[in-house]
Amino acid sequence: MTNNTIVTSDDILLKLCHSVAHVLSNTSASNVTHAGMVQSIARTRLKPDLGCFSIFDGGFSGLVVINFSSSAAIEIYRRYMLNMGMPESELAFSHTSDEVSNVMGELMNQILGDFINKISKELQTSISQSQPKMLTINKELTISIDANLDDAVARRVSFRTENNHIFYLEFAMDKTEFIRLDEFVYDEEFDPDSLLEQHSTIGANKGSVSNVSSLVKNADKPAITSNTIDNAEADDLLDQLGI
């Protein structure tokens, strides 16, 4: 008999927190972290200054809300755009800019995509998301969202940017548990950029070792003229081409 593993709503929330920190850290080339404590709340709300939400459905239903302060939104937006190679002179300075809303909405989409991919593999279930909606909110306005959840569990987690600006993730979903009945293997996640970097490093190291070996082997040999080297390289190229 196998030991049954139970995955609760809070375990799923932790996976979502990891997706938020992972995606925002990588895309902005900075360090975004989440708190080790989670707060139980009555319901989710969109709050100032920039609020984004998305509803998901399928194996279980839920709602994800991220409330960015203006300083947190601008920091993440500008770091993301600079990391993409945009000149600083062309970047927006206000969180009310449409460009900032569009970028933060795209980042929210990437976060949910990463989260759904992990959930689909680890819990062997399927969920889909709605297109994230981004709203610039006045300081006097708070919007409640009703996702029609049965026996909902609502949580709030605080996040911190590299410059110590705070933003909040609010999460609500059906109270549910996933119980492992049998052992299974799922594909491990890998980062394509890290894989390419690893192979580049290996190739560079091999090249360095090869160069050192050649220098050692040829240390006692007479000097070779540049014409001889050029001819040898040309012959190697022709051999590779099969000519």
Image (cartoon, helix red, strand yellow):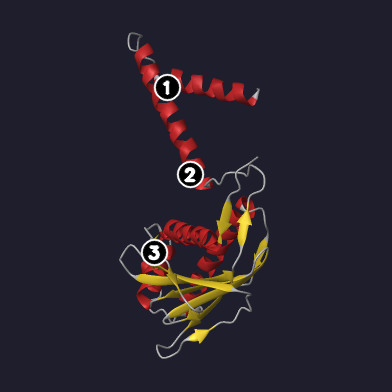
7 or 25: nearer the viewer: 7
Q: Are marks 2 and 1 in contact (CB under 8 Å)?
A: no
76 or 243: nearer the viewer: 76
Residue 194 shows which numbered tag?
2
Q: In the image, residue 18 lies at what x, y percent?
A: 47, 57
**What's under tag 3, amino acid-wise?**
Met
Residues under labels 2 and 1: Cα distance?
A: 24 Å
24 or 176: nearer the viewer: 176
* Label whose residue precedes the other's in the sequence (2 or 3): 3
* Label whose residue precedes the other's in the sequence (2 or 1): 2
Instruction: Examine the image and state in which quarter residue 114 appears.
Output: bottom right
Q: In the image, residue 235 lies at what x, y percent?
A: 55, 20
Whether residue 216 can be seen here: yes
Q: Residues within 10 Å of mark 1 (few under 14, many from 20)?
A: few
Q: Nearer the viewer, mark 3 or mark 1?
A: 3
In the rendered image, the quadrant that contains the N terminus is: top right
Secondary structure at badge 2 equals helix
What residue appears at the point 33 percent right and 8 percent down from the top-left corner? 220
**What's under tag 2, amino acid-wise?**
Ser
What residue appears at the point 66 percent right and 63 percent down from the top-left corner? 127
Q: Are marks 3 and 1 in contact (CB under 8 Å)?
A: no
Task: Note whether 56 is above or below 4 in the view shown.
Answer: below
Secondary structure at badge 1 equals helix
What residue appears at the point 49 percent right and 81 percent down from the top-left corner? 45
Q: Which residue is mark 3?
A: 37
Q: Farthest front residue?
A: 1
Q: Residues within 10 Å of mark 3 (few under 14, many from 20)?
A: few
Task: Note whether 177 is above or below 75 in the view shown.
Answer: above
Residue 210 shows which numbered tag?
1
Residues under labels 3 and 1: Cα distance?
A: 52 Å
